[in-house]
Amino acid sequence: MKMNASKSEDSSVTVLSFDTSTALLAVAIVKDGTLVDSITSFTERNHSVRILSEIKELLNRNGIKGTEIDAIAVGQGPGSYTGVRIAVTAAKTLAWAWDKPLIGVSSLEALAFGAWNSLRLANEDMASDRDTWIVPLMDARRGQVYTSRYAADHCGKWDTIDSDAIRLIADWAERIEEEATLDPQVATIWFVGDTLPHKTTIELSEQSGIRLRTFDFDMDAGAVGQLAELRYRQGERDDVHTFVPNYTQLTEAENKLIAASRGE
């Protein structure tokens, strides 16, 4: 459930953000859109053990008390079933204990936004007057990925084209390539995130000359905080009591297609 509240765009905002939807435990402090500090560790089987201690360490080394945070931001999923649940539970607990607003962010959108920020800093041959499509990937096994699609440009554009879903990577990459071929506004397409298991499939989908690029990228908790801050300033809040993970499942049509391919 989304709620609205007001916050002056000129006032300072400090966000504690974290995500455990992947093998990476990522925690960050973001203040006024800028990363203050962060901690990352590959501890997939220990997320539940380490998350609160990592948050405490990050706050302590920056001299910030939990009560001084303006909002709690969390990657809501999709991703690892257990991982997503751990982060969401921790976020709800801290938001309730510290009486702070809770803001959920799509883990896929955060993955895409973090990668986009990194690509811009690297100045990766991007057209200044056309769009770049950012397509985040999380491996879901058996040729499937958790994914979505965003359009970005150097003027600050950040639009959702396709929302979170689990899709067959071969079909998804072909669809992306075909649609980009028909859209003259698209200059570049980047598949980002967990790209290594699917790089060959993506490359095989390239038919028209529009280069489908890949960028292996880990979750960025700073991006979770930056996206959450934008929504916080717009007055968006999630209800602590009703907030739940976004696990994302296959559509009925996709389930039937997979079953048919296995002769079920």
Image (tube, rainbow, N blue to C red):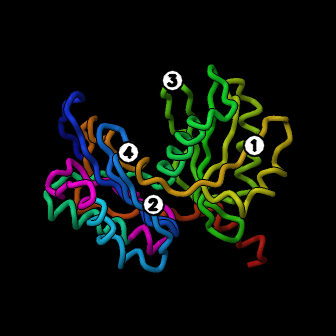
Work out whether mark 2 precedes mark 1 in sequence or the reverse, and give the earlier one.
2
Tell whether label 1 touches label 2 (CB within 8 Å): no
- Mark 2 vs mark 1, CA separation in Å: 25 Å
Work out whether mark 4 precedes mark 1 in sequence or the reverse, and give the earlier one.
4
Residue 146 location, quadrant: bottom right
Q: Residue at x 66, y 48 (%)?
A: 191
Which residue in the structure is indicated by mark 1?
212
Q: Is residue 82 magenta?
A: yes
Q: Amino acid at mark 4?
A: Leu
**Position above or below: 10 against 207:** above
Q: Secondary structure at mark 3?
A: loop
Which residue in the structure is indicated by mark 4?
35
Q: Secondary structure at mark 4?
A: strand
Q: Is residue 63 magenta?
A: yes
Report whether 254 appears left or right of 43: right
Number of residues whose C-alpha sits closer than 10 Å to that of mark 4, classed few (under 14), some (14–19) or many (20 or more): some
Report whether 182 appears left or right of 50: right
Work out whether mark 4 precedes mark 2 in sequence or the reverse, and give the earlier one.
4
Which is closer to the viewer, label 4 or label 2? 4
Which residue in the structure is indicated by mark 3?
155
Q: Amino acid at mark 1?
A: Leu
Q: Residue at x 18, y 35 (%)?
A: 6
Which is closer to the viewer, label 4 or label 1? 4
- Residue range in magenta is 59-85
Work out whether mark 4 precedes mark 3 in sequence or the reverse, and give the earlier one.
4
Image spot of residue 243 (x, y percent): 29, 60
Tell whether label 2 touches label 4 (CB within 8 Å): no
